[in-house]
Image (cartoon, rainbow, N blue to C red):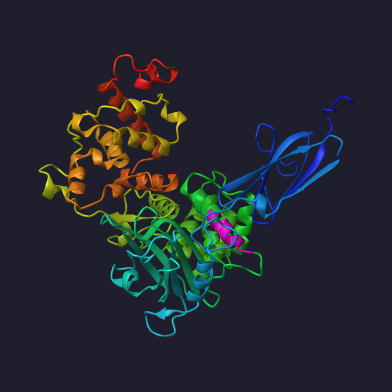
Amino acid sequence: MPPSDATKKVTVYVEAPDSATQVQLLDAALQPVALETTGARSALGALEVAVAPGAYTARLTRGGWFKDTTFIVDEREARYEKHLGEEDAPLMSTPTPLRKTPSTREIHRQPAKALSQVARDLHGPGMQQRLFVFVRDLDDKRSGNAAKGLRVQEADGHLLFDFDKDADVNEADGWAGANLGVRPGPYIIECAFASGRRDRRYMYVAEGWQTQVFLFSDRTARERRASMARMSVMMAKVERGFEFDWLGQGRPDVLWTETALRALRGQGALERGLSSLMYAQKFENPMLGIYAALLHLRSARANAALLHAVAANLIRLIGATPDVMAVGLGALMAGESARAADRALIAERSRQALRFPPMLLDSWRLIVAARAAGFPGIVRGSPAEDFLGEATMARPWFTSSEEPQSPFKALVDEPADAFDFGRPFELAEVDLDPYLPASQRSPTDQLRRLARRLRGAPKSRVRRLDLTRLEGSVAQLAWPLVDPRVRTWVELGIGKEDDVAIDALSDEELREEAERRLGIPMDIAADAAQAVIDKLAKANPPPAGYGSSSKSGPKALGA
């Protein structure tokens, strides 16, 4: 066989099953190949690039989920085409009832569509705007109201709609919801937990539009009840309602919504082509424009002219809601506009200070930054001002929480916020897995590892552990029964042991819960978890002779 020509290039064309799917070509080292024309490392729908012969991987991404297909590019070919179908694309989980997702349920799609068309006019007849909330449970073995614990309040906190009492509920199929005809303006969605904690998020309804909120039921509870751990929010013209399919093309805007929300939960950004599609689609679903603009504003080189145009169009579409004004304020701080009319419109609306918080945490940060930069910002004495200085960590949504009064004061004569675990734990020998620095473990893995250590510790041999307040908080989050007050609470029947376990939580749910309760980034929580593990190992060394294998040497003791 003649030797391979190292300079030969083969044109590779990879096509996804739809134009909303992100495509990447990875080399043998699984590094993205840059496109020759733009230098971008991905494209939407399809890409074409000249590469050297060899092994490559086509990666399709939807909503943060990806699936890889590997193939060989032969040097004898001038062009290689790979047309990928739905079977090659990732299945994306979403609270929105769509086709072709692992969370799809046919018994949820049609009811959601039908319910979105029939309104309950809570503010009198003829309301031309809606707040549509749909909650569904993927577990058909559970019973009860999927939206249990959910309520909608007026902006002043007065109850408007109670899903426990008044929602449309189908227990057999596991869904519940309501389509509320209301006046334009802010509303509060409140979710009550079995523990008594209440989380609240602001939602906005615009004249002529339907705000659509999709949720899953809490999968960690034994009976159905609502959860806001995963929430998708979109908007549609009120006469259109919710559609799970557009002309047989699915709902690409839902894929984009999930992609954007996943990026907003972390420190991510959007591929440039996807941002352009979302900006164009904002006239049908204005939330897409808000999501894309907020992610664009994370860039150090934000396009001020583009942001001015997006913000001005959003004001014309749905009004100066706090999230729209956050985009507008970000545009004003980013630079000048190419159109004086856009800048004048944003500047005029920004003179009115905000009374209520936005929906999204990135919007809140922009509003606070604008206030510090001299913009009017927030009305004194308003609900929005009440949140200044508070760390609200339930990304991507701006969330406020109200914890119930601690039951421990009535049970144990100790301060409710004390972290006195009595005595340190003796580690079970089987739990002494090799020490690995936090930097080499995911933060959620660290919390689960700590939970295993604490759960396996014999309670009869507990002594005092010298923990900092942060370490105590992390230990209590990982395994609350380490605190004797929580144990007493469970033993008296006030709660169940399953209610305090983290095992049933997904990594995403655990991250959100940890950041919400601790108010610190997860990498700091992971380091604190490792510190507790080290102190456990130091206070209770293993028996003599234990650790002769390579897995149980000095590193296993946290040395």
User: Residue farthest to the right?
Assistant: 2
| Quarter of the rendering occupied by the C terminus | top left
Front residue (pair 310, 138): 138
| Residue at the spot 40% in from the left edge and 44% down from the top edge | 511
Q: Give the range drawn in magenta.
A: 250-258
Front residue (pair 553, 518): 553
In-image side of 203 versus 85 (left or right): left
User: Residue farthest to the bottom?
Assistant: 125
* Magenta highlight on residue 257: yes
* Magenta highlight on residue 364: no
Residue 88 shows in this picture: yes
| Quarter of the rendering occupied by the N terminus | top right
Query: Where is residue 67 drawn, in percent x and y?
Result: 62, 46
Residue 354, picture quadrant: bottom left
Residue 222, picture quadrant: bottom left
Residue 528, picture quadrant: top left
Residue 293 shows in this picture: no
Q: How many labels does the image show?
A: 0
Query: Where is residue 56 drawn, in percent x and y?
Result: 72, 37
Front residue (pair 382, 113): 113
What secondary structure prevails in the magenta region? helix
In-image side of 134 versus 543 (left or right): right
Q: Is residue 148 above or below residue 124?
A: above
Query: Where is residue 234 drawn, in percent x and y?
Result: 51, 64
| Residue at the spot 64% in from the left edge and 56% down from the top edge | 20
| Residue at the spot 69% in from the left edge and 32% down from the top edge | 28
User: Residue farthest to the left?
Assistant: 413
